[in-house]
């Protein structure tokens, strides 16, 4: 087991085609996802009641190969994350990283999960403005999925205005939220982290719905 842990924890393994394939295919070992899709209407109403908030989500498929490996070797509970917002049509959409940046209906994602949590970020008004600008810039840029440690060593994090002058970014799912919100809210979002996991997102935001 120690040898296996060493193998899976190695940073190079997280960037192998094998691991990317497992995450992308995300096979489920048994049964069907158990999240009740009627909860969509509860989530939509929360966003309609406060459309100016900045929201994120975390979710997990408890019987997928990727999450089982993740929980054994990395001790993370939540499998995926992203931003969530009310669209112009009054329906709910997510912005997230899966191989590349995607903008999907929330229903597209909910049919895949057993558990889901809606999170609200405690941003002040100036921080909200900055976050919206960064999200818009990233949506208009090229992004690819890349899993790695030691984020603070990357050029993407070494310059305050990097996001303004570049049109290509690498993220894993929860890194996207960290990059956009870095140096806002509190010290848990400060520059200098080695990694920012889905569990870190869950712990450092306000949970306003969970099932």
Image (cartoon, rainbow, N blue to C red):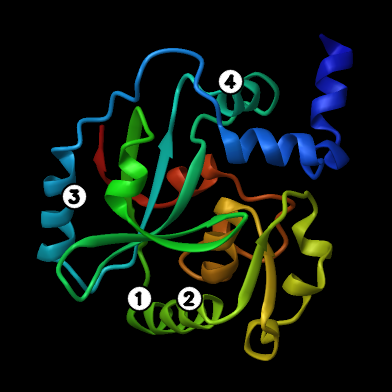
Q: Which residue is disc 4 drawn over?
A: 68
Answer left or right for 87 relative to 190.
left
- Location of residue 126 in the rendering, given as x and y in whole percent from the top left corner: 39, 84
Between disc 1 and disc 3, the foreground one is: 3
Q: Residue furthest bottom?
A: 165
Q: Is label 3 in a helix, a strand or a loop?
A: helix
Query: Mark 2 vs mark 1: which is more N-terminal?
Result: 1
Query: Is the C-beta separation of discs 3 and 4 under 8 Å?
Result: no
**Label 3 CA crowd tier, 10 Å (few <14, some 14–19, many 20+):** some
Query: Mark 1 vs mark 3: which is more N-terminal?
Result: 3
**Label 1 CA crowd tier, 10 Å (few <14, some 14–19, many 20+):** few
Q: Residue at x 20, y 76 (%)?
A: 88
**Label 4 CA crowd tier, 10 Å (few <14, some 14–19, many 20+):** some
Q: Which residue is disc 2 drawn over?
A: 135
Of the 4 image quadrants, the one containing the N terminus is top right
Q: Which residue is disc 1 drawn over?
A: 124
Q: Which residue is disc 3 drawn over?
A: 43
Q: Is label 1 in a helix, a strand or a loop?
A: loop
Q: Residue at x 57, y 31 (%)?
A: 76
């Amino acid at each position: 087991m120690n040898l296996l842990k060493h193998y899976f924890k190695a940073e190079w393994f997280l960037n192998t085609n094998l691991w990317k394939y497992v995450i992308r295919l995300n096979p489920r070992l048994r049964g069907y996802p158990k999240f009740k899709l009627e909860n969509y209407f509860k989530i939509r109403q929360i966003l309609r009641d406060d459309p100016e908030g900045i929201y994120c989500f975390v979710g997990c498929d408890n019987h997928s190969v990727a999450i089982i490996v993740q929980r054994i070797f990395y001790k993370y509970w939540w499998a995926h994350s992203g931003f969530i917002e009310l669209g112009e049509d009054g329906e709910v959409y997510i912005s997230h990283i899966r191989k590349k940046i995607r903008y999907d209906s929330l229903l597209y994602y909910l049919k895949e999960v057993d558990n889901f949590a809606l999170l609200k970020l405690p941003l002040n008004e100036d921080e909200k403005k900055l976050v919206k600008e960064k999200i818009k810039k990233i949506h208009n840029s090229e992004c690819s999925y890349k899993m790695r440690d030691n984020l603070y060593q990357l050029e993407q994090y070494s310059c305050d205005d990097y996001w303004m002058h570049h049109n290509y970014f690498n993220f894993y799912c929860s890194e996207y939220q960290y990059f956009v919100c870095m140096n806002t809210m509190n010290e848990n979002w400060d520059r200098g982290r080695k990694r920012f996991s889905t569990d870190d997102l869950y712990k450092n935001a306000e949970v306003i719905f969970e099932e």
